[in-house]
Image (tube, rainbow, N blue to C red):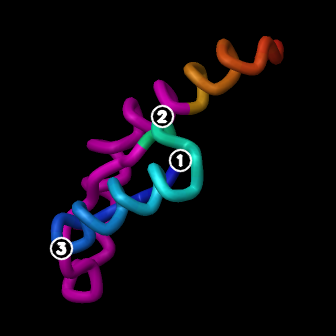
Amino acid sequence: MTFVSPPFRVMALRRRESLGVPDLPLVWVVHPMMNLMSDDIEALADRIFPQVLEAIASRLQTTGAEA
């Protein structure tokens, strides 16, 4: 799983292909993050948390690992 902001979208998509992991989950975050206050960061974490869990669960299913 990789966290990506919009300015790096194309690069992230190309990079995962060139690394041979086209199904690598990408979790989208805001850009820039350096201007965010702690409350905003917490809200972002709350918003992307389901995507993170989904990526982890998908990886566990793919590898056959047990949670």
35 displayed left or right of 3:
left
Judging depth in this view, the residue of 10 and 64 nearest the camera is 10
Q: Are marks 3 and 2 in contact (CB under 8 Å)?
A: no
Q: Secondary structure at mark 1?
A: loop
Inter-mark Cα distance, 3 to 2: 20 Å
Mark 2 Cα within 10 Å, few/some/many (few <14, many 20+)?
A: few
Q: Amino acid at mark 1?
A: Met
Above or below, 41 relative to 24: below
Question: Which mark sits nearer the N-terminus, 1 or 3?
Answer: 1
> Which residue, given by chain and number where applicable, does mark 3 sit on?
7
Question: Which mark sits nearer the N-terminus, 2 or 1?
Answer: 1
Above or below, 47 relative to 10: above
> Which residue, given by chain and number where applicable, does mark 1 sit on?
1
On the image, which quarter does residue 63 sit in? top right
Residue at 34% from the left image edge and 62% from the top image edge: 4
63 displayed left or right of 40:
right
Rendered location of residue 56, percent (x, y): 59, 31
Above or below, 62 relative to 50: above
27 displayed left or right of 64:
left
Q: Secondary structure at mark 2?
A: loop
Mark 1 Cα within 10 Å, few/some/many (few <14, many 20+)?
A: few
Q: Main secondary structure of the magenta part?
A: helix
Rendered location of residue 53, percent (x, y): 51, 30
> Which residue, given by chain and number where applicable, does mark 2 sit on?
23
Residue at 57% from the left image edge and 56% from the top image edge: 19
Q: Amino acid at mark 3?
A: Pro
Residue at 17% from the left image edge and 65% from the top image edge: 6
